Image (tube, rainbow, N blue to C red):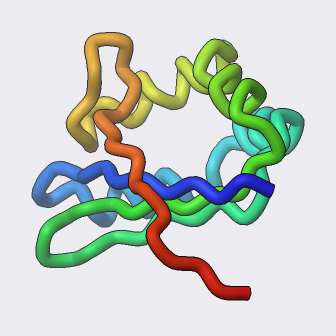
C-alpha cells in the first residue's frame, strides 16, 4: 500500500455542512474510490484553522490519479466547490504532504 497525506481547507462557517455532505458520501463515489484501489481514507478537520488533513492508502498512483477523470468525481467536486477553495476545474485546492516518519 502507498500512504498519502494532503491538506485542504474549508471556508469559514462551512465546517458543519462539509461534514454533513460526507456523512456518508454518495454510494457511486464510494464505489468508484474502492474500484480504483482506495483504502482507509480519512479526512480530519482542525477546528481553529479550518484545515482539512486527508490520509489515504492506495494501491497505485495511476489508479488514484484516474479518479479525477471519472464523471462522479467531477460531479462531487462541483457539489463541494461552494464549501472550500477550489481550482478552475472544481477540484479542491490541495497540497500533498511528505511523509517524514512512520511506524507499524
Q: Residue at x 32, y 30 (%)?
A: 81
Q: Nearer the viewer, residue 69 or 76?
A: 69
User: x, y (%) of residue 60?
Assistant: 78, 37
Residue 78 higher or lower than 8, as above or below: above
Q: Nearer the viewer, residue 94 or 29?
A: 94
Query: Horizontally, is 77 left or right of 7 in the view?
Result: right
User: x, y (%) of residue 35?
Assistant: 88, 36
Query: Horizontally, is 92 left or right of 73 in the view?
Result: left
Q: For residue 57, what is the image quadrant?
A: bottom right
Q: Quadrant of the C terminus?
A: bottom right
User: x, y (%) of residue 38?
Assistant: 77, 48
View extreme (right): residue? 35
| Number of numbered discs visible in the structure rendering | 0
Residue 78 higher or lower than 89, as above or below: below
User: x, y (%) of residue 1?
Assistant: 81, 57
Q: Nearer the viewer, residue 87 or 100?
A: 100
Q: Residue at x 70, y 34 (%)?
A: 61
View extreme (front): residue? 100
Q: Residue at x 34, y 56 (%)?
A: 17
Q: Residue at x 45, y 70 (%)?
A: 100
Query: Horizontally, is 85 left or right of 77 in the view?
Result: left
Q: For residue 72, what is the image quadrant?
A: top right
Q: Can residue 23 be spotted in the picture? A: no
Query: Horizontally, is 24 left or right of 17 in the view?
Result: right
Q: Can residue 22 be spotted in the picture? A: yes
Amino acid at each position: 500500500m502507498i500512504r498519502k497525506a494532503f491538506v485542504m481547507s474549508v471556508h469559514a462557517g462551512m465546517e458543519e455542512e462539509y461534514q454533513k455532505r460526507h456523512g456518508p458520501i454518495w454510494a457511486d463515489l464510494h464505489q468508484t474510490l474502492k474500484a480504483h484501489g482506495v483504502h482507509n481514507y480519512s479526512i480530519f478537520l482542525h477546528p481553529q484553522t479550518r484545515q482539512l488533513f486527508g490520509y489515504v492508502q492506495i494501491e497505485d498512483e495511476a489508479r488514484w490519479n484516474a479518479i479525477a477523470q471519472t464523471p462522479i468525481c467531477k460531479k462531487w467536486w462541483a457539489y463541494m466547490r461552494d464549501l472550500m477553495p477550489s481550482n478552475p476545474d472544481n477540484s479542491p485546492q490541495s497540497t500533498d504532504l511528505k511523509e517524514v516518519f512512520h511506524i507499524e
